[in-house]
Image (cartoon, rainbow, N blue to C red):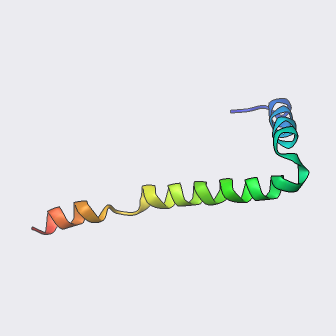
Amino acid sequence: MFGTGELIVILCIILLLFGGKKLPEVARSLGKGIREFKKACYEPDEKEEKHTED
């Protein structure tokens, strides 16, 4: 996907944009968002289950 050089450049840009103090907060928020997205993708939809029971 990305090489090592590209990842270093991306990380440097993120560090310049958000600063060192906000970086852990941004990473935590990003991780939480990805976790919630994956959870929503794998959970069965309650509406679909109700339709199949009828």
Q: Quadrant of the C terminus?
A: bottom left
- Residue ID at (80%, 35%): 10
Of the pair 43 and 12, the residue shown nearer to us: 12
| Direction right: furthest residue | 20
Q: Which image quadrant is residue 32 in? A: bottom right
Height in image: 52 above or below 13?
below
Height in image: 22 above or below 9?
below
For this view, does 4 lie left or right of residue 46?
right
Height in image: 33 above or below 49?
above
Q: Which image quadrant is residue 51 in? A: bottom left
At which x and y percent is residue 13?
A: 83, 35
At which x and y percent is residue 5?
A: 86, 30
Of the pair 4 and 29, the residue shown nearer to us: 29
For this view, does 2 lie left or right of residue 18?
left
At which x and y percent is residue 46?
A: 29, 65
For this view, does 22 lie left or right of residue 38?
right
- Residue ID at (79%, 31%): 3
At which x and y percent is residue 17?
A: 82, 39
Q: Quadrant of the N terminus?
A: top right
Of the pair 47 and 1, the residue shown nearer to us: 47
- Residue ID at (19%, 67%): 50
- How many labels, in total? 0
